[in-house]
Structures are given as structure tokens and as C-alpha cells.
Image (cartoon, grey):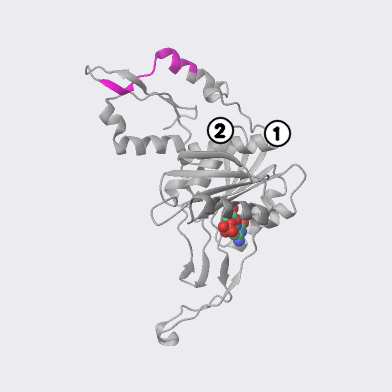
Amino acid sequence: LATTAPVVVAPAMHTEMWRHPATQQNMRVLRARGVHVVGPADGPLTGGDSGPGRMSEPDEIANAALAVVSGAEGGRARDLAGLRVVVSAGGTREPLDPVRFLGNRSSGRQGVALAVAAADRGAEVTLVAAHIDGEVLGGVGDGVKVVSVGTALEMQDAVTEAASAADVVVMAAAVADYRPAEVAKAKLTKEAQGDRLTLELVENPDIVAGLAAGRLSGQTVVAFAAETSSGDELLERARRKRERKDVDLLVVNEVGWARGFESADNEVVVIDRSGEVAAEASGSKREVAEAVWDAVVATRR
Ligand code: C5P
């Protein structure tokens, strides 16, 4: 834990242990923190049984370690080196009164994974973070500059400022579309409101659409879309949203009561300017992050 060196882990254990949810969850935590994982291989184990859990061959582990210190993990180049990247993550909160807010269920995990992956690929990263748990934000190393914000308007200021010198902006945050027209100075009470309370909301600026409209030359703007539809309808909505916001890439995922938001895994489709599916990825949020950066590198080319 004290080392500042890159860490490579080569897990070796019985198949049952490897497949256990506790192990899998711990592996996801390690990956999200930027630990490099080699193996395990699938083959004979010391107990005489056979399956995933066999230690990778020493040569393979040595090669993986060499690749990490030479900056080419698993053949992955530091292909974001020299680029300045802004990632927004988490969910904004719009205050109603001094103690209440309108918020959403975004944990910030996907955005944090994007920021860490970009830093590992050589980018200079600013993470604009809205209400991300310390446990999740703890996965961010020294290589990422964190700017904390609360509301959509604060996020707009922070992202716009960081974007003014950025090559790539990825808006992974869940931004409130509306905010209360007025923030009550004192706590709203049942005594004063009675049995019905009507809130008036006003639209927040669409931050990513604003950035895309004023983008610097050569700047790549990426938006996310969480949709509760699926299949063709999901893709059609995604295409329309990409066009409306005029972003270079739209990363869309299906969400629901039990999908997407607080979980460690994610499943996304990336739509490009032509409306084509540029990438599809599923797995840990780190794996999804790598696929998004692959798509960013490909469009910039
Ligand atoms: O329109 P929708 O909210 O689904 O779009 C989601 C995308 O737009 C995300 O990338 C989100 O960060 C961004 N967004 C924004 N400003 C808003 C609302 C969403 O930048 N007010």
C-alpha cells in the first residue's frame, strides 16, 4: 500500500475461490485503483483438479511487469500521452432548502474509472466530481486533479474552465436537467405547506451541448446517456441524442432499478458521428473505460 511503483498482481487459487463473488469484487476494486492483473490461467491446479485459477507462467508475469514499467500494459500504448483530458463524474444536487436537494443515483464509479484509465494511458487529467463517495474517489491516484462541485451550475463553471485548455472532454456526470426555481431560505415545513407541495423547476443549461457548440478546434467532446429503453429504441434515442448535442461520441447504457448506477459492472454502446456503433463494451467499469478511450483515440485519428 505504501509503494508508489506500479503494482502487478498474478492471482493463483482454486477455481471456487477465484469465482467467488468476494474475490471477483476485490479484483474489481484493485483494477479500478489501477492495479495491473495477470491471469489467472486455466489449467491443472495443485489439488489435482483443473480450471481457472492456475498461476500464469513466470515468463508471462515477467513480460506483463516489463510492459507496465515501459508504459505499454498488455501492448496498450500510452496513447493519451500529451493530451489534456477533462472527465466529469458523479451526480449533481440541486438544493430545495438548506437541508434538502433533488439528486440522482449516480455513484461516480464510471467517471472515476475513466479518469484513472486516462491517467494510466498518459493523459493529464482533471476530474470534476459531484458528490462522489470517499470510498469511490479513493481510487483516484495523484495523477488526477480533482475539482469538487455541488450543483449543475457549479459543474458548468468548473467543466467550462477546465475544458478551455483540454483536448478531450468526457461528460460522464449525471447532471440535473432542472433545478428549483427558488431555493427556500429556511427549511420547508409541513406546517407552512399543508398536505400538498408544488415545486417549480427551471431548466439547467445543457453543459455538454454548450461545450460541443463552442468546442476548440481539434477538441473531442464525449457525452454519456443513461436510458431506460432497450434494443433498437435505445439505439435510435442514442442517435438522436448524439445529433442534438452535436458530440463526437455518445456512450449509451441501459439503466434500471437494478442496472447501471451503483453496480461495479457496466454495459455500453458507443455511437459516433455517422450514427454507427463505434464500440460495444461490457465488464468492469474500468474495462468499459478502456473501450471508451479506445473509441476516443480512434475518432481523433
Ligand atoms: O440529455 P441527457 O441528460 O440524457 O444527456 C446526458 C449527457 O448530457 C451526459 O453526458 C451528461 O453529462 C450531459 N448533460 C449535461 N448537462 C445537463 C444534462 C446532461 O452536460 N444539464
Earlier in the chain: of badge 2 and badge 1, it is: 2
Find ligand 1 in the image and state its quadrant: bottom right
Residue pictured at 61% horizontal, 41% vertical: 125
Could you say where residue 41 lies in the image, as x and y percent from the top left?
A: 37, 21
* Amino acid beneath label 1: Arg
Vertically, is 102 above or below 212?
Answer: below
Q: Quadrant of residue 296?
A: top right
Point out the residue furthest to the front here. 232
Looking at the picture, tell me which residue is in the foreground, 282 or 54: 282
Vertically, is 75 above or below 244?
Answer: above
Q: Nearer the viewer, mark 2 or mark 1?
A: 1
Looking at the picture, tell me which residue is in the foreground, 5 or 78: 78
Is 189 positioned to the left or the right of 298 in the image?
left
Could you say where residue 262 lies in the image, as x and y percent from the top left?
A: 42, 51
Is residue 122 shown in magenta? Answer: no
Point out the residue furthest to the right here. 217
* Amino acid beneath label 2: Asp
According to the picture, the residue beneath numbered tag 1 turns out to be 301
Could you say where residue 169 lies in the image, as x and y percent from the top left?
A: 65, 46
Could you say where residue 82 lies in the image, as x and y percent from the top left?
A: 68, 33
Residue pictured at 59% horizontal, 62% vertical: 152
Mark 2 → mark 1, Cα distance in angstroms: 20 Å
- The answer to whether one can see residue 129 in this image is no
Distance from mark 2 CB to nearest ligand 1 atom below 8 Å: no
Vertically, is 215 above or below 29?
Answer: below
Local crowd size for mark 1, using a 10 Å CA cut-off: few (<14), some (14–19), many (≥20)? few
Where are the magenta residues, as a range?
50-63
Q: Secondary structure at mark 2?
A: helix
Residue pictured at 43% horizontal, 83% vertical: 196
- Screen quadrant of the N terminus: top left
Badge number at residue 120: 2
Residue pictured at 67% horizontal, 53% vertical: 243
